[in-house]
Image (cartoon, rainbow, N blue to C red):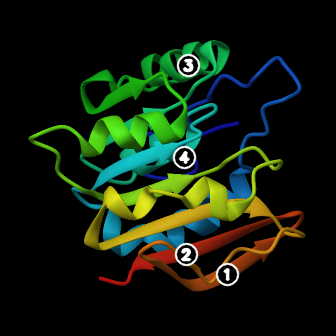
C-alpha cells in the first residue's frame, strides 16, 4: 500500500496484520482522488471509519489543509499514527478514537465547530450504507462532498438525512457513491 500521487507520492504505508481491516485499493484511491482533485487544495477533510488512514493521507498528499481521522479500533488507530509518522504530516492530522456516531455528535457539539469540505467514509462491508451515512450531513459544509466506499453488491440510498446521492462509480468488488447536501 502506498500514496498514489501528490507531494507524498510513493510513500509506503503500513498495512494491517489482522483480517478484519480492508484497505482501499491503490487503484480505487487513485480514481476517487482524480475525481476529487478540484476540491482538495486547502480542504478540511474528515475520514470516518479511517482504518489505515490511507484516504486521509492521500488527501493531504494532494493538497488538503488538514485531516481528522475517526477510528474506534485501537489497533487501527496505532496503524494510522504509524502512517502519519511515515508521511511526516503530524502537523496536519488528528485522530479521534470513538465510534463514528459518538464522534459526529461530539464534533457537532463543539462551540467553534467548522464543517468539513470533504467527508470520506469506508465503513466495514457489514454496515448498511444508510447507517454509515446517518448524521454526516450535520458535519459537511454546504458546498462540501461526502464519498462513501461500499461493497458493489450493496446499493447506496438516494437520500440520507440532508444528503442526496449525485453519482456512483464501481471498480471490482467496490463502489464509490458521492453525496451533496440538499440544504
The residue beneath circle 2 is: 178
Residue 48 is situated, as x and y percent measured from the top left of the image, at 52, 43
Q: CA distance from mark 4 to mark 2?
A: 15 Å
State the separation of the CA atoms marked 2 and 3.
Answer: 26 Å
Compare marks 4 and 1 and give the one earlier in the sequence. Answer: 4
- Is residue 98 placed above or below 113 in the rendered structure? above
**Discs 4/1, front:** 1
Q: In the rendered image of this protein, does residue 158 appear above or below residue 89?
A: below
Q: Earlier in the sequence, mark 4 or mark 3?
A: 4
Quarter of the image that includes the N terminus: top right
Residue at x 64%, y 50% (from the top left corner):
122
Residue designated by label 3: 77
Which residue, given by chain and number where applicable, does mark 1 sit on? Answer: 168
Residues at badges 4 and 2 in contact (C-beta under 8 Å)?
no
Q: How many numbered badges does the structure rendering display?
A: 4
Q: Which residue is mark 4?
A: 55
Local secondary structure at mark 2: strand
Q: Determine if residue 137 is in view.
A: yes
* x and y, in percent, of residue 27 in the image: 72, 59
Between the residue at mark 3 and the residue at mark 1, the CA separation in whole angstroms equals 29 Å
Residue 5: give x, y in percent of width and height: 51, 53
Amino acid at each position: 500500500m502506498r500514496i498514489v500521487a501528490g507531494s507524498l507520492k510513493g510513500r509506503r504505508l503500513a498495512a494491517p496484520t489482522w483480517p478484519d481491516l480492508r484497505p482501499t485499493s491503490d487503484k480505487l484511491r487513485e480514481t476517487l482522488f482524480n475525481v476529487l482533485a478540484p476540491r482538495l487544495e486547502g480542504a478540511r477533510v474528515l475520514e470516518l471509519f479511517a482504518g489505515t488512514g490511507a484516504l486521509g493521507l492521500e488527501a493531504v498528499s494532494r493538497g488538503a489543509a488538514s485531516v481528522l481521522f475517526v477510528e474506534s479500533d485501537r489497533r487501527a488507530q496505532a496503524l494510522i499514527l504509524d502512517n502519519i509518522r511515515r508521511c511526516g504530516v503530524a502537523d496536519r492530522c488528528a485522530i479521534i478514537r470513538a465510534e463514528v456516531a459518538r464522534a459526529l455528535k461530539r464534533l457537532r457539539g463543539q462551540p467553534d465547530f467548522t464543517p468539513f469540505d470533504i467527508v470520506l467514509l469506508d465503513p466495514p462491508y457489514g454496515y448498511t450504507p444508510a447507517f454509515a451515512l446517518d448524521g454526516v450531513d450535520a458535519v459537511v459544509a454546504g458546498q462540501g462532498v461526502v464519498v462513501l466506499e461500499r461493497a458493489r453488491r450493496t446499493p447506496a440510498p438516494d437520500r440520507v438525512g440532508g444528503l442526496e446521492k449525485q453519482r456512483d462509480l464501481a471498480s471490482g468488488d467496490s463502489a464509490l457513491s458521492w453525496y451533496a447536501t440538499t440544504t
